[in-house]
Image (cartoon, grey):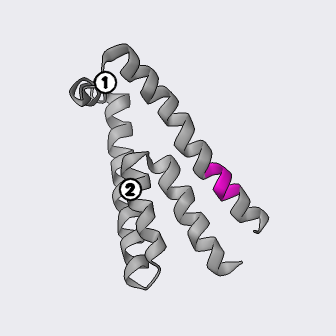
Amino acid sequence: MTPLRLVYLILVVVGAILPWTYFYAWFAENGWALGPMIDAWWVNDATSALVYDLTIAAVALTIWALVEAVRGDRWFLLVIPATFGIGVSCGLPLALFLKARREG
């Protein structure tokens, strides 16, 4: 494994764990219903901007993953659940990790 791929892999792990530590803390304090969390995303302009920013990035990443899958790299389909189930912080480094294996 190249050093660059190792960096991407570390970012996949950190991008999966770090955001979810905050999600778990929020759910532990507020309950496991998604409605209140979604309401919290829109409490001010800063959080709304982040929602739009991450949603657009997630859609672009999903399109890229689908294109790569159609081109024959089915492993890129893993990017979609990583992105929407965990976050862009996991999905993007995973896509870069997968892309780098063909270049290194």
Q: Quadrant of residue 36?
A: top left
Q: Amino acid at mark 1?
A: Asn
Q: Foreground residue, 48 or 87?
A: 87
Q: Which residue is mark 1?
A: 44
Q: Position of residue 7 (x, y in %)?
A: 71, 56
Q: Position of residue 3 (x, y in %)?
A: 78, 63
Q: Amino acid at mark 2?
A: Pro
Q: Which residue is mark 2?
A: 81
What residue occupies the far top of the structure in this picture?
A: 29
Q: Position of residue 87 (x, y in %)?
A: 43, 46
State the residue at coordinates (38%, 77%).
Answer: 67
N-terminal label among 1 and 2: 1
Point out the stretch of residues depicted in magenta: 7-11
* SS under mark 1: loop
Q: Is residue 57 visible?
A: no
User: In the displayed structure, would residue 51 be above or below residue 102?
Assistant: above
